[in-house]
Every structure is written in structure tokens, then in C-alpha cells.
Image (tube, grey):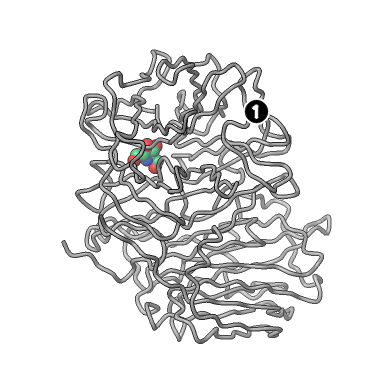
Amino acid sequence: ENVKDLHRTGYHFQPTKHWINDPNGPMYFNGVYHLFYQYNPKGAVWGNIVWAHSVSKDLINWERLEPAIFPSKSFDQYGCWSGSATILPGNKPVILYSGIIDKNNTQVQNYAVPENVSDPYLHKWIKPDNNPLIVADKHVNKTAFRDPTTAWLGKDGQWRITLGSRKNDKGVSLLYKSKNFINWTKSKKPLHSLAGTGNWECPDFFPVSIQGTKELDTSVIEGDIKHVMKISLDATRYDYYTLGTYDTKKDKYIPDKGMVDGWNGLRYDYGNFYASKSFFDPSKNRRILWGWANESDPVHDDVKKGWAGIQLIPRTIVLDPNHKQLLQWPVEELETLRGKKVELINKKLDKGERVEIEGIPAAQADVEVTFSFNSLEKAEPFDPSWDSYDAQKLCSQKGSTVQGGLGPFGLLTLASEKLEEYTPVFFRIFKDQEQKHVVLMCSDASRSSLEDKKGMYKPSSAGFVDVDINDKKLSLRSLIDHSVVESFGAKGKTCITSRVYPTIATYDNAHLYAFNNGTETVEIESLNAWSMNKPQLMNH
Ligand code: DQQ
């Protein structure tokens, strides 16, 4: 087959060809990171789903192995859908995944174990004959019954998992318990649910440390912790989370007071990021999050280019010291790919000014910048009727070219020299009626490509940044990689991923600028940009 390279990424995870979606069963086992993912071995559209398998010692350089789990038995002959890994006592990994058993999409939960635990890469996985482990009872919708989580151990010695479902229009995270990991019983009450949210996919449930120094295994259920509940909402295709408490007696998750649950709540990422999954990495005491970014181009373009979907750069997640949200940051190993560096220091940007960051290939780069300003006076008024759901609307109305007071300022990524194409990532600062500042962050794909065909998705993705700007500074990091721009505002408080398909701003014709379109002068206090080397991807 003919795989088109034009928009392929340089340092994001991709197979050589074909369709990928959800990251599955990430784990660290005996010194090796495993990443499985939903994969169509036959083409660039969703279908024929297997668990592809790659291994790495550093989360950056990968070896591709043969698919680990693929349809072969009555309990998964129509597909091996998403699931998770748990490492059982005695250092025994086990995978739980959803099997599709018929043409009507009936879902069951299966398990698989390594054929040989001493094989360092765990190439082969066996699906024992006592599968399926869990089938839908009569109270459960058997076509909305999937994506089991990593298990956690209760104080009663029973394992627990949760999986995504719905009851009519209510999103549900069903809870199952087991003493031996084989016989599972459904709890009467779900772990969590929310009316009006529709089907929940790929739930994730885990602790975060309140101290924020050392992250924790999924089985840590008490102590100085909070719990995170993440759901992937099929209806909007975003990953939402809340922080809360796990009531271990009632086996219930209770979001903290003030948390917005559901489609107007906090998102891991306000752009193209879905069906994510986290795991605990005991080698560095951290929790790592993998998310999938689908293409934003028409399906027939995927078929033409021979591939679709990427995994985003794995991110560490910790609790924000304000305890109201998480902070995400690309894993430190990514920095080993940094090559040539260019920098700017104390560079003023007056109203309407733009400066080019020269000297590195701008199509494949990592940029970190801190902007500062002298005054908050010129912040525009914030309309009290706007709520968090309006960020995207605001960003599309007040794009990077609409002059503001304090902002818009930020980066123009994947820009052509004459700006026929560019993807701006920027901030715009407002002041509400209580004189509180509201920071909007945008990653605006609306002018990312001159191509404008039906089915092309160019959203003005945006979120608010809950940050104290009394120190008059805002930082931004963008990972730019040919057809993806993954950005982290204010040290990971707000993250936005855009998938874009420039036609001119490609390879050496891509440029990178910093800009200010506000009346208030802003200063680039410091800007560091690196070229990014290609990781090693080996086929076995
Ligand atoms: N994708 C998988 C499902 C999951 C959905 C199938 C989310 O298991 O619910 O490929 O993208």
C-alpha cells in the first residue's frame, strides 16, 4: 500500500499504516512499558479491531510487536475492544478487555494473560477457556457495556473494576467485585452515574496524592488522596473528569462540592483527545496518561493517506495545589528528543507585532514561552452570561486577529510565510464584574489549512485557564508535529490539542511566530524552542 507521509508525525506515536484508536492496557512491567491500542490491521478506517502492541524502555522509543489480542474465540470473534491491565500480586499481569460476540454488537468482558511471564516483552497473550468473565445481566444494556478499568483491591480483599454503560440517557459506571479475579459480581449501585450524559466509554478511576510528591498505585484507596473519575462522553467525544472522594464503605464515588460533572465540566484536553487511559509507573512514582487524537480530515482522505489516528505524548498527571483540578505535563523523557535550541529573552511585542522564531524546523518542534505584561488594566470586560461551555464560541468570535486589550497574544504555529495558513495558540484576558480576571486559551484550527473540503473539521478549540495572573505572567508550551499541535497553558492547567492539515506550511515551509494583537504591550520574558529528533521505532 501507498502510505502518504505529508502529515505523518515525526515524534508522536503512530504505526506504519492503517487506523488506530484508544490506548489500551498501558502498564510498566519488569522494566518495560507496554502500550496496546485499538488497531485495524486491514485499513485506515475503524473496523476489524485488534489490540496492537508496542514496547518501550522510555515511553519515547518503541518496538512494534505483533498484535497481542485479536478475535479468535466465540467470546471475541467480532472484535477486541478497549480494556486495561492490572498487575496482580506475585507480579502477574492480566488484561481485561471487551469482546464483541455477535453482529448485534453484544459486549462481554474477557481476560487474557501472558503465555510466558518471563518473556521480557510479553509477546503472546492467552485467552483462557473460562472466558467470558462477565456478561450483561437483564438490567444492563448489552451493547453499552464495555471498557473495563484497571482493578483496585478493597480492604475486604475483593478486587473491583468499573466499566462504561448507560441506562437510557443516564451515563453509568458499573461496579463489579471479585475475590479471585475470575468470578465477578455486579454491585447493586454503580460507582457513579449522571443523568442526561448518554453512554460512558473508557472510564478511568484512580487516586492522586494531595501532597503531589509521589503518585500512587490504583489500589491505594485511602490516605492523603483524592480520587479522579474520568469518563469519555460518546455524545461530545471529549474526556471529562471530576475530583472527589471514594467512599469505600458504600463503594461510591462522590465528586467534590463545586465540581461540575458531565459535559460542562473539566476536560483533560479541550481539543482532539479521547478515550484516554492512565496507569501508575512505579519506576518513577508517577501516573501517566495516554490519549488518542483522531484525524480531523474527511474519511476518504484517511483512506488515501493510508493511516488515521495518533497517540498523543504521554502526560504525567498530578493534583493542582489548589485541589480544584489536575495538572498535565509531557513526560520528561520527551526532552531527550530535543535537538537544536533557539531562544529569545526580554523581547517586547507591541500592539500588532509579530516576531519569527528562526533557526529550527518549525514543523517538528517543542516550544516553551513565558509572556509577561506590566498591567492588567486593559483586560476586556467578561460578559456574565458566558460560562465555561462558551470558551470555544468566544475563541471563534474573538480569534487571534481580532484586536483586544490584554491579548490575544501567543504563538502562530505551522504558519506559512504569508500567513495563508496558521494555527494560533494564544491567550486573551478578560475581567468580570467582580474585577476577577478570566483567562481564555485558544488553539484555533480555523485557518490551519487552505484545503476546505466537506468533512474537514477545523474547530476553534478553547478552554479557560484557572490561574492567578496577579504576577502578570502566562506560560505556554506547544508540541508541534506536522499535523498536530499539543499545547499546555500555565504549566499544564489547560491543555488543547489540534489536528491540522496545512498545504503550504509543511516541512521547511512551516514557520513559527510569537504575536501580540492586544493594545497592551506584552513581553516575551523567555522563549526556548527546540527542533525535535525522530524517536526510534523498530519493527520486529
Ligand atoms: N472505542 C472502542 C470501545 C470504546 C470506544 C472500540 C471509544 O471499546 O468504547 O474501538 O473510542
User: Mark 1 highlights which residue?
Assistant: 246
Disc 1 C-beta below 8 A from ligand 1: no
Residue 350 in view (yes/no): no
Image height of 61 relative to 317, above or below: below
Q: Where residue 490 sits: x, y (%)?
A: 67, 62
For label 1, the SS is: strand
Q: How many marks?
A: 1
Crowd around label 1: few <14 · some 14–19 · many ≥20 (10 Å): many
The residue that appears at 40% across and 27% down in the rendered structure is: 145
> Where is residue 165 drawn, in percent x and y?
45, 28
Asked if residue 226 lies left or right of residue 504, the reply is right
Residue 146 at x, y percent in the picture? 40, 30
Location of residue 148 in the rendering, given as x and y in whole percent from the top left corner: 44, 31
Q: Quadrant of ligand 1?
A: top left
Q: Residue furthest front?
A: 118
- Name the residue at the right extreme: 434
Q: Along the horizontal axis of the image, is 169 left or right of 310?
A: right
Q: Amino acid at mark 1?
A: Tyr
Quadrant housing residue 528 = bottom right
Which residue is at 26% across, 29% downward? 76
Check the picture and name the quadrant holding the C terminus: bottom left
